[in-house]
Amino acid sequence: MGYKHKPTFIEKMAESIGLIPNLHSEEDYAPSVESLTEPGDLSKYPPPDQWNDWTEYEAKTWPKKEKKTYSIVPTTCFNCESACGMLAYIDKETNQVRKFEGNPWHPGSRGRNCAKGPATINQITDPDRILYPMKRVGERGSGQWERVTWDSVLDDIAGRMRKAIQEGRNNEIAYHVGRPGHEGYMDRVLKGWGVDGHNSHTNICSSGARFGYAIWYGHDRPSPDHANAHAILLISAHLESGHYFNPHAQRIMEAKMKGAKLIVLDPRLSNTASMADEWLPTYPGTEAALLLAIARILLQKGWYNRPYMEQWTNWDAYMKSEHPTKPQTFEAFIDALIDVYAEYTPEYAEKETGVPVAQTLEVARIIGEAGTRFAQHNWRSAGSGNLGGWAVARCLHFLSVITGSVGTVGGTSPNTWNKFHPHFFDNPPAQKFWNELHFPKEYPLAYFEMSFLLPHFLKEGRGFMDTYFSRVFNPVWTYPDGFMWMDAYKDPKCFGLHAALTPVWSETAYFADYVLPMGLASERHDLNSYETHSGIWIAFRQPVLREKARRDGKQFKFTYEVNPGEVWEEDEFWIQLSWRIDPDGSLGIRKHFESPYRPGECITVDEYYQYIFEETKGLKETAAKEGLTALDYMRKYGAYVVEESVYEVNKRPLTAKELDGTEVADDGRVLKKGKTVGIVHDGKPVEGFPTPSGKNEFFSQTMVDWKWPEYAIPQYIKSHIHEDEMDRSKGDYPLVPTFRLPTLIHSRSGNAKWLYEIANRNPLWMHPEDAAKYGVKTGDLLRINTEIGYFVDKVWVTEGMKPGVVACSHHLGRWRRPSDPAGNRWATATVQIDNDGNGGYKMKQLKGIHPFKSDDKDSARIYWSDGGVHQNITFPVHPDPISGMHCWHQKVRIENVHPGDEYGDIFVDTKKSMEVYRRWLEMARPAPGPDGLRRPLWMKRVLRPVEETFYIRDEE
Ligand code: SF4
């Protein structure tokens, strides 16, 4: 095995005369860390010592040379999770932010941004943004609002929460987050309140794939070392729009420039697939069949990493349980694997997926040759689209295990190895409540909260939300079954008070009680750290006008004093709210919000970050070299490298402290109070993996114990949109709605004019052969029927779509009603919604996007009118019975339009929504599991409550 790519003649020539670096010497494959310690090769960026006073020519007055002087403040982008570094250029004359560019000192993004980063300037200058807190004055959803003071908001909400907590109704308080992006901040706040109130969007996003990884090795996210890989396999479009889009994309391209092979599984010819060496347009939901076929080829050909598999998988547990009469040897294990996966021949994979046998063999060869330098990633995509989608990530990780590329240079590490974990000034104890609205008994293995079922649960009378915060989140528009959300939000029997914390109006904010404007990327503090590559870094999102005011020596207390209008930042909002919930400290909440430096007084946001940065390994010392405090260093550079590279943490020796009170079991597990905390490897106790066995679990006793023995080992699960489910004679198609256009951001690009100018429609992608069946050409309308309704969309006829499959981007179709406050007018169609009083909802577009007058002259120049169609609202909920992930793909029945159908028409029957919900609920195999548990103790749980809550009490 080994790296085989040969330079082309042109590459050889270019390398020999120094036109391009020599990319074909073996040295180039050593781990590259210099890019983590030095700014990216972006020498045109202003040097940091001039950031306080930077002069350049004004672009707008060209060719006249007019000088402008800026104060440049680093912060981070908030337009996806990557938190790329940005530099805000603040005009010293006007104190206005003029533009955002990349921060070359940020180790993840290294000076680069995608289109969404610089578009932050659109968001902060959007004429429709909300600048003051608003309170509903009419019926919920009626569109009538009045401006109120922050004081009244804080007192009202805090009083309500205090009462709920005093009365033991802690489970009636919830925080529902869309875009998080602050390491541990809210978990600490919620624990401080003692509520099991964390609710995230993860089960409509990534929890399928997370479960697939976690059931293997306890870590739930992959961190591929793309830059050093020889083969990269992506299930989704990471280069153009996937997770950690820009930081991953730049490293994938670096690897490709060094000759790495890129393999992409996607039924759609995405921009990423177009850059692939091997594009495998698999039928959606069949990816695991292909991965198992590849796995079997690797095993048959002997292209597996024996030392890794033998030492770091629980193969012996599998043999003992499933093949007790066979020799308990590793050789017998490999034979058993080839046997158990006998069905997964390349021919079977071709039948299931449509990928030709020869291509499967070639891809297996590429992966086999890459060996320990095989990197992979699955995030949303197949993991989030299909019943059993989690099994795709499980089968994908199987390839990493076979090649021994887990945690290696050029391989794939667990995310936790590449992510920073801050030390807080105060750690409240775990809460003593288990909220079944978030983790119901039906879904004991659900990897995150069953958040998309909340309206269904509330309508069924399972509970009540007394005080509910939605935070940078838009469930009415983003989630499936949006009319159910609208219904529940309007219903006082479901929600007592809903405060929408959001920088902009949204389809969800329209149905809230309070709309509380929170800062955009450059108007708030957050600590960021993500697994963009093999190192660990932190970045500081800071309110740039606050930092500028500090540099100017101005006096202020809170960020809203320097932000536009009265836009708060959440960090300060939560501190102030918590302080008012417990003004005298009698609830035991206030003490968690007291300053570590000024006993008894309320902590400031500066003190909060000062403490974390002082506790960050090496930061204080690095800062001191420049005569700075740790906080000032972060204010100055906006980012810091904690570890340059991290590999093979599973082999890290346990410390004396960690070993204290442990014992070693016969099978080599290091146990503390009966729980695995490490494993003996090469005679030494080491960290291992956080699973019951301490190893990669090929065989999962957890799946057996929790009533899913058929999935004890990696398996292919046929999706709910498998070909067997289709009646092609009636126009059935699988619809792939899980992709996004690279310049858009879920519901947060509606206030970014540049982004909407680039992309504003979401037609139905259809292959010419399929279009011919309907006699349609690009731009014609089709009616797409789901299980609960339909939407009418234009078609885009393209050979970039797999025949027999259709796709539609999920980022478009924003709307507002005539009664709603003007919001996101760059992106929203005006619609009429009619309720037939019997569960049926109709939405009709009254007017597309159109120009409007504002302080921004561009608003009168809008030339696009089509904002797309809101397809998600026509989807029922599909909770995967194991991972809990919403399975986004839809079996749709496509028809030519009916008389009277118009573009953007939508119909949904919410009675059918409830029927589909109950049908999927029946697939679940509820708790209790062993010992009366409601969830396996070893599995992670967000905002983990005390251990006794894991056991179902007798009275339950
Ligand atoms: S990838 Fe783009 S949107 Fe995401 S953080 Fe980076 S610049 Fe912002």
Image (cartoon, grey):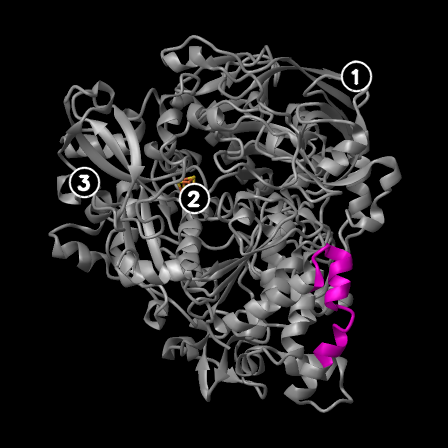
**Residue 245 to residue 372: above or below:** above
* Magenta residue check for 243: no
Task: Choose mark 3 or mark 2, whichever is in front.
Answer: 3
Q: Residue at x 33, y 32 (%)?
A: 523
- Disc 1 crowd rating (10 Å Cα; few below 14, some 14-19, many 20+) is few
Q: Residue at x 32, y 27 (%)?
A: 560
Disc with the residue nearer the chain's start (2 vs 1): 2
Label 3 sits on residue: 46
Label 1 sits on residue: 836
Amino acid marked by disc 2: Gly
| Range of magenta residues | 336-357
Label 2 sits on residue: 181
**Residue 563 to residue 435: above or below:** above
**Residue 507 to residue 945: above or below:** above
In percent of width and height, residue 704 lies at 74, 69
Q: CA distance from mark 3 to mark 1?
A: 61 Å
What type of secondary structure mainly makes up the magenta span?
helix
Q: CA distance from mark 3 to mark 2?
A: 27 Å
The answer to which quarter of the image holds residue 127 is top left
